Amino acid sequence: MFGLNRWWKRVDKVTARRQSKVKRREPIMVERLEDRVLLYATSGNAWPNSQLITISFMPDGTDLGGVTSNLEATFNTKFGTAATWQNQILKAAQFWAQQTNLNFSVVSDNGGALGSGSNQQGDPGFGDIRIGGYNFGNSTIAQSFLPPPINNYSIAGDIELNTGTTFNVGTQYDLFTVMVHEFGHSLGLNHASATAACMYATYNGVDTALNADDISGIKAIYSAGAARTADAQEANETTAAAK
Ligand code: ZN
């Protein structure tokens, strides 16, 4: 029998169903502090226009590729109002923005099928990062797509939550905690090996803030100026990353 941790990691692999054939490489340490090794992992992917990354909520019925999104109905029933759960999600995005030059803006979503747009960024029909969900039928909590260039069309950055999972605010599975992790992927981070990091592969309790390792990781991708160019590293994970 797999331990929970290991089992989740296994799910990670299984659900990376849309992964491209990218050579796996050891994570590259891009920075080293005097007395400890940084354990974050960048994917080599980043939003070209980090000054304005748009977010949208997919309407229910959005085609996710053989299944349709039911996030709104599921979460409205669970949380009472759309504002309650959407605020948790947007707060998670904002925690990353506070550390870097990233700016997020919420836009409307026309319900076009997942990945139906050719634009990596700035599609007029929906956000750069689209959020939807369906019942995965397994124990994976959520999955997300890395930003360009590995995903070079509108699927880049999109996040799917498993609506078969019981989400909560402040208790397992804490929606904010899960979304901080998924936005990390959507912004270009892979899993961190630090257990305290929000980007650790396994849900291990409620996070209320980014860990120092997460902050170092996002700053390594997005500096105070323009987004770091993504040519120095290949992606070392997959296009779809499960929590
Ligand atoms: Zn993950």
Image: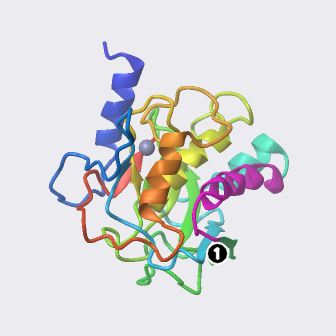
How many residues crowd around disc 1 within 10 Å: few (fewer than 14), some, or many (20 or more)? some
Farthest residue in the bottom direction? 124
Residue 163 visible to an observer of this rendering: no
Q: Is residue 101 magenta?
A: yes
**Which residue position holds label 1?**
109
Is residue 14 found left or right of 170 in the rendered image? left
Farthest residue in the front direction? 34
Farthest residue in the top direction? 1
Q: Quadrant of ligand 1?
A: top left
Farthest residue in the right direction? 80
Circle 1: residue type: Asp
Residue 138 visible to an observer of this rendering: yes
Q: Is residue 219 magenta?
A: no
Say which quadrant the C terminus sits in.
Answer: top left
Measured as percent of width and height from the top left, residue 50 is found at: 53, 74
* Image mark count: 1
Task: Name the residue located 36 percent from the left edge and 65 percent from the top edge.
Answer: 45
Measured as percent of width and height from the top left, residue 170 is found at: 74, 32
Ligand 1 under 8 Å from disc 1 Cβ: no
**Viewer-proximal residue among 111 and 82:** 82
Say which quadrant the N terminus sits in.
Answer: top left
Query: Which quadrant of the figure has residue 193?
Result: top left
Secondary element at tag 1: loop
Task: Name the residue located 58 percent from the left edge and 87 percent from the top edge.
Answer: 124
Task: Name the residue located 77 percent from the left edge and 54 percent from the top edge.
Answer: 87
Residue range in magenta is 82-103
Measured as percent of width and height from the top left, residue 75 is found at: 72, 47
Query: Which quadrant of the figure has residue 54?
Result: bottom right
How was the colour assigned to the protein in this rendering? rainbow
- What secondary structure is the magenta-colored segment mainly? helix
Task: Name the residue located 68 percent from the left edge and 73 percent from the top edge.
Answer: 105
Question: Is residue 222 shown above or below 42?
Answer: below
